[in-house]
Image: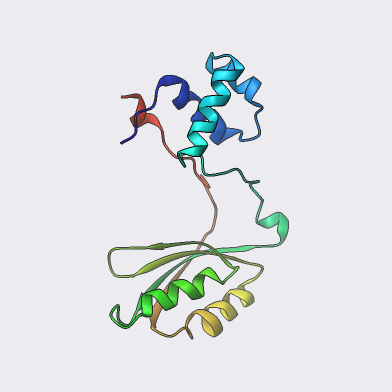
Amino acid sequence: MPQFDDFEIKMLDILQRDGRKPVSELAQEIGLSTTPCARRFEALQGAGIIKGFAAVLSRRAVGLMVEVFIQVRLVTHSDGSPETFIAAVQRMDEVSSCWTMTGDYDFLLHVMVPSVDELNAFVMHRLMRLDGVRDVHTQLVLQNIKGPGHVPLGHLRR
């Protein structure tokens, strides 16, 4: 596991909450001058620890009223089905995230669509028709209590 000092841990914590914070303000908050703070910031980016910055959008404000998690089970794993499925999912705009999983299902998809009718069309006419898909299990999100989340950093302080 990489080693981080207190300045870097504070920096990462602050940037997760406000990625647009200027380096001068960041330096002041963590207790460094601007130049060493900027060097640490660039080093964290160069090491791939800071992967980038993005705007967090309200799905409802852009018309995506239905949010679901979909578990997908494939027929087999030995015929290229996983690779084919992954390639197809990467082209589906409705899928915001996809994970491979252990357990009864092979993949977990996070999907957002404008309506239940659009969800039905996505599941029945696109997802279920992909080669190698055996079955799906859909769970409707009623309310998002917490997230999208931050990366926990408490273990770095031990």
- Seen from the viewer's position, the closer of residues 5 and 142 is 5
Residue at 57% from the left image edge and 77% from the top image edge:
122
Q: Position of residue 37 (x, y in %)?
A: 55, 21
Q: For the C terminus, which image quadrant?
A: top left
Snapshot quadrant of residue 42:
top right
Residue at 41% from the left image edge and 32% from the top image edge:
153
Vertical relation: 17 (above or below) 125:
above
Q: Position of residue 85 (x, y in %)?
A: 43, 76
| Count of numbered tags | 0
Q: Position of residue 29 (x, y in %)?
A: 57, 18
Query: From the viewer's perspective, is 127 left or right of 26?
Result: left
Vertical relation: 30 (above or below) 144:
above
- Seen from the viewer's position, the closer of residues 120 and 111 is 111
Residue at 65% from the left image edge and 20% from the top image edge:
24
Q: For the N terminus, which image quadrant?
A: top left
Q: Give the colour scheme shown.
A: rainbow
- Seen from the viewer's position, the closer of residues 18 and 68 is 18
Q: Position of residue 102 (x, y in %)?
A: 29, 63
Vertical relation: 115 (above or below) 19:
below
Residue at 43% from the left image edge and 78% from the top image edge:
84
Query: From the viewer's perspective, is 19 left or right of 68?
Result: right
Snapshot quadrant of residue 105:
bottom left
